[in-house]
Amino acid sequence: MRKLITALILVPLAIVLVTFAVANRQTVIISFDPFDQAHPAYALPVPLFALVLALVIGGVIIGGAAAWLRQSKWRRSARLAQAQARELSVELERLKRSLRPVELPSGPVAADYQPRLTIPPPAA
């Protein structure tokens, strides 16, 4: 089921990306010189689709890194809770081994033994 959902999302996305790349093949010049627009010191000609895709990929990476850094306190608390659970599990096993099982008397019960049951008088 998961593969089907992934295919239903990725196939249309791939079609859109290929269509975008074919429609935007013209070259744009990226200039890194803010002072001279006519004759920049360093300019890079790049196809428009490559520039847009590189910016989208860069945004996804920066957003993922920001989310990962923001969640660090939750990952730390989960690690501490897991370590504490492991320690408590080890302690529980140690306590279970240290307890001796209660032995019930195995001899015959006396014939005249009657359990004592006391019923309190009704409240008046």
Image (spheres, rainbow, N blue to C red):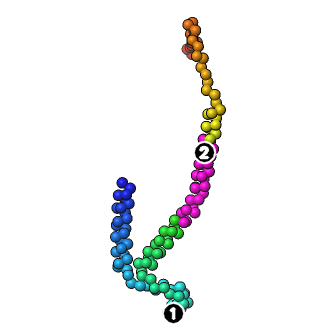
In the picture as drawn, the residue positioned furthest to the right comes out as 98
- Locate the N terminus by quadrant: bottom left
Residue 109 seen anywhere in this rendered image of the structure: yes
- Residue position for label 1: 39
Quadrant showing the C terminus? top right
Segment tinted magenta in the rendering = 65-89
Question: 10 Å neighbourhood of mark 1: few (<14), some, or many (≥20)?
Answer: few
Name the kind of residue labelled 1 in the image: His
Above or below, 104 against 21 in this view is above
Asked if residue 80 lies left or right of residue 16, the reply is right
- 16 relative to 43, above or below: above
Question: For the point 56% across and 59% down, which residue is it?
Answer: 71
Residue count near mark 2 (Cα–Cα under 10 Å), binned few <14, some 14–19, many ≥20: few
Give percent across and percent down for residue 15.
34, 70
Q: In this view, does 71 lie to the left or right of 4?
A: right
Residue 53 numbered mark, or none: none
Q: What residue type is labelled 2?
A: Arg
Query: Mark 1 or mark 2, which has the lower sequence index?
Result: 1
The residue pinned by badge 2 equals 86
Q: Kindly indicate the quadrant of the structure image that contains residue 17.
A: bottom left
The x, y position of residue 47, in whole percent, is 42, 82
Magenta span: chief secondary structure: helix
Q: Is residue 52 above or below residue 120?
A: below
Residue toward you, 9 or 95: 95
Disc 2 secondary structure class? helix
Indicate which label's residue lies in the foreground, 1 or 2: 2
> Which residue is pictured at 59% across the width and 20% down the height?
104
Residue pictured at 60% horizontal, 57% vertical: 73
